Image (cartoon, rainbow, N blue to C red):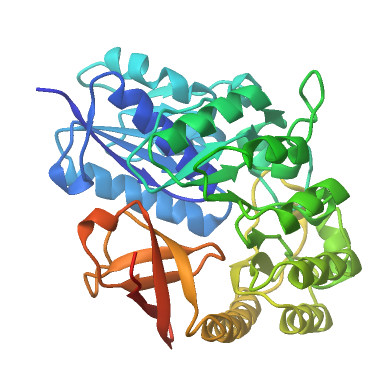
Amino acid sequence: MSATVAFTTLGCRLNQADTQALQALLEGRGFRTVPLEAAPDVVIVNTCTVTARAELSDKRAIRRAARLSPHGRVVVTGCWAQTSPGEVAALGGVDLVVGNADKARLPELLADLPVAGRPRVEVRDIAEARIETPGPAHRARQFVKIQDGCQHRCAFCVVPLARGASRSLPPAVVEDHARRLVEAGHPEIVLTGIDLGHYGADLLPRTSLAALLARLVTIEGLRWLRLSSMLPAYFTGEVLEIVTTSPVIAPHLHVPLQSGSDRVLRAMRRPYTVTMYRTLVERLAGAIPRLGLGADVIVGFPGESEADFAETVALVESLPFSYLHVFPYSPRKGTEAATRPGVSAATAAARGRRLRELAATKNLRFREGMRGRVEEVLTLEARDRATGDLVGLTGNYMEVTFRGPDRLRRRLARVRVTAVEIGATRGRLEEQ
């Protein structure tokens, strides 16, 4: 009987892409993927370290893995494992700590793991990490990591310490991998990276994200090519041309904001201004009908005044966001901002609530604008837990539930949006 493995993933889309790669790697070595509740032989916990709250979630996930699989081996990898391996190893129930640079060695590390003893720690300099290309997995949407690491040094961000310098996968490798995924029945591909717009700058010969997109949108059978988070400065004329004109590029973009105050953006060392951000968003919204637009916002950054926060609220109110990810500032060891006096936790929490309420209002308005429309959706692999209905994802990143047969899972369907509620969008399957 083959060994069983379960996966728990925390954090960003890049972590989801890494988990897909690990799943393909272990299944290629004879492992069988099962739910965590099945008490597998091995549990892989892929961690995040972007905030203190993320690390708290990491600890909860690790303890849950040890509790649900008491006779299995608990492996912790990802960004928290890379930056704080000693702290991870000190948690009860951990058998193996694997840094980001050693994920590809996981089958060998598991084979050499003693039956019992102190946790084994395998963490090297992240600069040695390679970018792996997994085989097709079982999800409807496939995450393809084309870039890792970051050359920016934002004052609040620990990611460069966890992911290393920017490095890219050669375009021919990306294209070949994408073609194989589409041939295997995956109509949507999500391109992921820590600093996605920097793609290709480290390669010889040098290339660009625009050149890669031009290759990928020609893949026959690819319905949606979705971009993950990308800084405003990377929307060059070439990128804008293909993003706003190609029917294959999903009408959904995530452009990090962090603050609507130029003073705070400078303190954060962000490489853009409010004017640059506004100009880009207005151009994108004017060129892409029903654009799904998301952003990250940090509240309570050291030195953020009430006036700074008011500028952020005003900017968010004025731009056509369909959702926001709002985070209270969290000091990270080794970052510049960690040494500065911060805003009180109560003030940050109040500002976060204000922005989340505003984001919920804008999201409801965005979804109400879709009512009555027939949309092509990618039906996800799991049904809605509350209703048992299928769940479809539109090109502009709106989830809609609808009744339908299991044969539609992981396939494209046409759905009319019939009802919009707080927290839910419902639809009706149209004739296929």
* Quarter of the image where one finds residue 264: bottom right
State left or right for residue 77 relative to residue 383: right
Toward the viewer: 361 or 88? Answer: 361
State left or right for residue 353 relative to residue 197: left
| Residue 150 in the image, given as x and y percentages of width and height | 72, 38
* Quarter of the image where one finds residue 252: bottom right
* Quarter of the image where one finds residue 166: top right
State left or right for residue 284 relative to residue 275: left
On the rendered image, what quadrant is the N terminus found in?
A: top left
State left or right for residue 127 relative to residue 7: right
Q: Is residue 380 visible?
A: yes
Residue plotted at (31% across, 34% down)? 94
Q: Is residue 424 visible?
A: no
Considering every residue shown, the one lying at the far front of the view is 431
On the rendered image, what quadrant is the C terminus found in?
A: bottom left
Q: How many marks?
A: 0
Q: Is residue 83 above or below residue 350?
A: above
| Residue 397 in the image, given as x and y percentages of width and height | 53, 65
Residue plotted at (54% across, 43% down)? 14
| Residue 325 in the image, given as x and y percentages of width and height | 59, 67
Residue plotted at (82% across, 25% down)? 206
| Residue 108 in the image, given as x and y percentages of width and height | 35, 14
Considering every residue shown, the one lying at the far left of the view is 1
Toward the viewer: 93 or 150? Answer: 150
Q: Is residue 157 above or below residue 253?
A: above
